[in-house]
Amino acid sequence: MLWRTFVPATGGVRVPLSSRLHWGARRYRSAGSQYARPGTYPITITIDAEHPGPVVPDDFAGLSFERGPLNPGNAGVAGYLFSPANNSLITLFRNLGLRNLRIGGGSVDDFIPAGTGSDGFTGIDDLFAFAAVAGVKVIYTLRLLNPSARPVGDLKSVNAQAAGYIWRHYRENVASFAIGNEPDWHAFHTFGGHPLDPAIYEEISGVPGSAYTSYLTSWRSFADAVGDAAPGAPLAGPDTGAYSTLTYTPDPESGVSWTERFAGDESDSGRIADITQHYYVGGGPGKTTAQQAISNMLSPEWVHGTAIGTQPARTTYIPYPWFYANHLAPVVAAGLRYRLTESNDYLTGVPGASNVFASALWALDYLHWWAAHAAAGVNFHNKQWLYTDTVVPDPAVSAGGYAVTPKGYGIKAFTLGSSGQVKPVAIGNPGGINVTAYCIGGAGQDYVTIINKTHGAQAADAAVTIVPPGPGLPDAQIMALSSGEPGDATGSNATLGGAAITGDTPWDGKWSALSADPRAGISLTVRATTAAILKIQSGR
């Protein structure tokens, strides 16, 4: 991740931005006026078992870290953050159900490559020993940028040596190798009018997309070297960071994203595990307040918007459907997988929003939305130490202990209810309250997740009925995700299944039995600003 001013554009969409935003604002106010009253509102959920969607990979939920943690003493950590001796962090990874760990970020192209320092491959050895114990696979990013002012001697060979070492010793815990980070930004190609990397350059000044041809040539050269040193190792890329298609060509009417171009160019290579993209929905927060950020994170517009929109404090958001349609749907159409290897609500986060209970509901909904849209996974970026982090040093422990923020509870709620294949759901919501629902399951068992995102003055309980998916009496159990205060999204605490998640002991959340009727279905109340995960066995 690199810190930059976020300047969005709306390539590929023909409606003027001002018109779209006006319509979007009216739509949001109209929806809000329907659920701005306290009370309980009926919700009906019907599962479509006849038209199943994508299978959710076991390693869907993950975290992303910078290259820095492979250095000892990074960000105040004693020794190496990733170590088989870091029992607290290992316990948290296991408790959350995390199965994927990406090492990357902007620091990949800033630090000397791992393995070339005085500590040799110690950081890499500890990383993969940690991965083996924690049960995760690693997306390991190699350096691509080689500035003329501070060149790394024979960088291609250095990368090949590291990849070969990792592949020979730790291939069972390798998800893929990536090369470079966010190459589509203008700052990657030029700095102060001088080339930052002579091998990657813009053919048209100020048009980042015109650097794609030289980038692809450079990337393929590095990829070939990695393939020679680590035969059969899967690759990932391009780890793009920009959101607009307008930056990729002088002609906005024919602009396509760098991600889409890369997917097309590498679709037949047989070496790509995942096409990778970065995504911070709210962009740079500017002066966004915690209250504003919470309202945005839990808004229907982030989930349903089809155009880039505005938020308070003169910032913008990139709604999921727009981002998918303009960047990732073409990847699926090309027959490739895609993964959001660096993602979060806001770039750097908003205190009192990105690190409170609102983030738990946001993360749970976000993971389910992308699973339903055929993503291979999402890695929440955990740059040490930001408001958006999932895992942070435990303030109650003097040294070496780690704690999970509320966002981690949303991740855990997802991993509990994401085994199987996505099944579409139809939601009857006559009151128009801010509720989403998802189903993932298989033969004989479904998980239904219901997220009530109403909060504050708009808080409303949902009286939910799940229509029986088939004949017979279903066996249902429920687990609640709550801050303890229905309607309050600002709390710093959370529970799941009545239990906290710590780095000290295995999580001990409990499922509770839920009554069901073979004719009326399953009924429950989902309180305001809470979520419910249901485990439903087929009818007896």
Image (cartoon, rainbow, N blue to C red):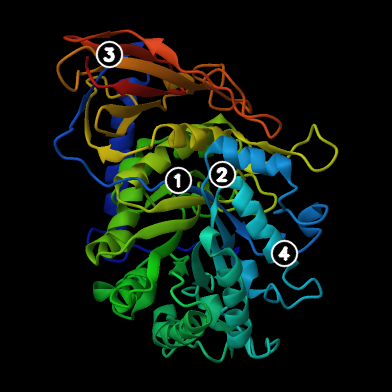
Which residue is label 1 attached to? 311
The percent coordinates of residue 102 (x first, y second) are 55, 58
- Residue at (51%, 20%) from the top-left corner? 497
Q: CA distance from mark 3 to mark 4?
A: 51 Å
Dot 1 or dot 3: first in sequence order is: 1
Which residue is label 3 attached to? 522
Which residue is label 4 attached to? 123
Dot 2 or dot 3: first in sequence order is: 2
Q: Quadrant of the C terminus?
A: top left
> Closer to the camera, 106 or 82?
82
Dot 1 or dot 2: first in sequence order is: 2
Which residue is label 2 attached to? 288
Q: CA distance from mark 2 to mark 3?
A: 40 Å
User: What kind of residue is marked 3?
Assistant: Ile
Dot 2 or dot 4: first in sequence order is: 4
Res. 217 image quadrant: bottom left
User: What kind of residue is marked 4?
Assistant: Gly
Give neighbour class at mark 3: few <14, some 14-19, many 20+ (Cα, 10 Å).
many
Give neighbour class at mark 1: few <14, some 14-19, many 20+ (Cα, 10 Å).
some
Q: CA distance from mark 1 to mark 2?
A: 8 Å
Q: Is residue 448 left or right of residue 400?
A: left
User: What kind of residue is marked 1?
Assistant: Gln
Q: Is residue 142 left or right of residue 48?
A: right
The percent coordinates of residue 237 (x first, y second) are 44, 70
Q: Is residue 36 above or below residue 409?
A: above
